[in-house]
Image (cartoon, rainbow, N blue to C red):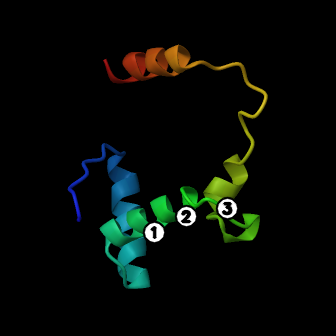
Amino acid sequence: MQTKLTLRLDKELIQSAKQYASHTGKSLSQMVADYFTLITREEPPQIEALPPITRSLRGLLKDADISIEDYRRHLEEKHL
């Protein structure tokens, strides 16, 4: 069963993603679904299979002391 998902993203990012999707012959929805499938697999993906931006961010916050409340506060400050 498919369900609608609304995402709020930067306008330029959306345009770039649409161009990339068009170039690869996929819909933007299919690209997002493929990415979600990749990151939610039971077995960890091979590092080489990750998109370059994801690969560059891998492990960035491993030893960081950040709580859910820190993240919520960040989102409130950013969007309010």
Disc 1 to disc 3, C-alpha distance: 15 Å
Q: Amino acid at mark 3?
A: Glu
Q: Is residue 35 positioned above or below 72 on the image?
A: below
Helix or strand or loop: what does disc 2 sit on? helix
Q: Amino acid at mark 2?
A: Leu
Residue most extreme to the bottom = 25
Query: Dot 1 corresponds to which residue?
Result: 34
Instruction: Give how far across and how far down residue 63 sits, in percent.
Output: 79, 28
Task: Name the quadrant containing residue 67.
Answer: top right
For label 3, the crowd category at 10 Å Cα-Cα, with few meaning under 14, some 14 to 19 and many 20 or more, is few
Residue mark closest to the camera, 1 vs 3: 3
Query: Dot 3 corresponds to which residue?
Result: 43
Query: Dot 2 corresponds to which residue?
Result: 38
Check if mark 2's residue and mark 3's residue have beta carbons within 8 Å.
Answer: no
Instruction: Give how far across and how far down residue 17 sits, in percent.
Output: 40, 64
Task: Name the quadrant containing residue 80.
Answer: top left
> Which quarter shows the N terminus?
bottom left
Report how many numbered discs are placed on residues in the image: 3
Left or right of 35 in this view: 44: right
Check if mark 2's residue and mark 1's residue have beta carbons within 8 Å.
Answer: yes
Residue in the picture at 57% in, 61% down: 41
Residue mark closest to the camera, 2 vs 3: 3
Disc 2 to disc 1, C-alpha distance: 6 Å
Left or right of 1 in this view: 57: right
